[in-house]
Image (cartoon, grey):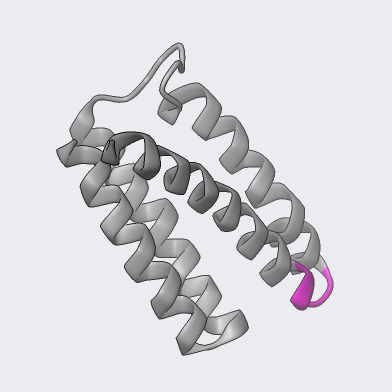
Amino acid sequence: MIKPINDGVRFLMELTTLVLLIGAGFKGEGLSKILLGVCVPLALILFWSRFMAPMAPNRLDEFERMVAEVVIFGGTALISYRAYGVKLAVTYGVVVTINAALDHIL
């Protein structure tokens, strides 16, 4: 019962991560708009589909996925803090931490 709900929340958090990165990128100026607003989200999509997704051809093992999640979600929380402020960053960080913990426990 909890696993399917957590999986749905996980998918929404993955989409939220992309939206936050794209939005933060386009708040920047010049080259950062292209790098953070387009290139980083595109690279993240490619990385996630190849190494992190449940049916990925080269899925990382449990420990490697946890490290990648800390880098991806933690980095997004830091970027969100800089672009949107502390409330959004903390809310995002708490939800994604709880979701990731449940994902690895269940």
Residue 14 is one of the magenta-drawn residues: no
Q: Position of residue 73 (x, y in %)?
A: 42, 57
Q: Out of 21 and 12, give the one closest to the viewer.
A: 12
Q: Position of residue 48 (x, y in %)?
A: 51, 33
Q: Position of residue 80 (x, y in %)?
A: 54, 74
Q: Out of 32 and 51, give the one closest to the viewer.
A: 51
For residue 3, above or below residue 100: above
Q: Is residue 68 left or right of residue 8?
A: left
For residue 23, above or below residue 12: below
* Residue plotted at (58% across, 57% down): 16
Q: Is residue 18 left or right of residue 105?
A: right
**Quadrant position of the C terminus in the picture:** top left
Residue with the most extreme top position: 57
* Residue plotted at (57% across, 42% down): 44
Residue 27 is one of the magenta-drawn residues: yes
Q: Range of the magenta residues? A: 26-30
Q: Quadrant of residue 64 in the image?
A: top left
